[in-house]
Image (spheres, rainbow, N blue to C red):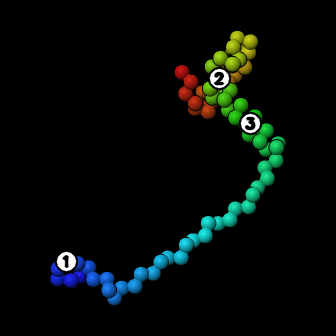
Amino acid sequence: MLASGVCDTAGMETHALPALAAPAFEEIDIPVWAWALVAVAALVSYFVMLENGAVLSGAAETLHEFFHDGRHFVGVPCH
């Protein structure tokens, strides 16, 4: 720094950092049965955690109570 408060960069060299290449990801083929399994798991999760009779209505009261007790078992608040 000079006496006037201005930075003297005359003798300094600047070096750019090399650009890092993004890692190459291989394309993964996911089988159809795996997507179907994910869909079934999402549907089961919905029924266990969120179903309050809107979908099952009165036709499946026993199933509703079963899932209601399951919510208490896994700690999902439902009241």
* x 32%, y 86%: residue: 10
| Residue 75 shows in this picture | yes
Q: Is residue 9 left or right of residue 58?
A: left
Mark drawn on residue 39: 3
Q: Amino acid at mark 1?
A: Gly
Ranked by sequence position, the earlier of labels 2 and 1 is 1
Q: Which residue is mark 2?
A: 51
- The front one of 72 and 11 is 11
* x 34%, y 88%: residue: 11
| Image location of residue 8, percent across then percent down | 27, 83
Give the alpha-carbon distance from disc 2 to disc 1, as whole Å: 70 Å
Q: Is residue 57 left or right of residue 1?
A: right
| Image location of residue 50, percent across then percent down | 62, 26
Ranked by sequence position, the earlier of labels 3 and 1 is 1
Ranked by sequence position, the earlier of labels 2 and 3 is 3
Where disc 2 sits, the SS reads loop
Where disc 3 sits, the SS reads helix
Label 2 Cα neighbours within 10 Å, binned few <14 / some 14-19 / many ≥20: some
- The front one of 35 and 72 is 35
Residue 51: quadrant of the picture = top right
* x 36%, y 85%: residue: 12
Between marks 2 and 1 in the image, the one whose residue lies nearer the viewer: 1
Question: Farthest bottom residue?
Answer: 11
- The front one of 22 and 52 is 22
Q: Which residue is mark 1?
A: 5
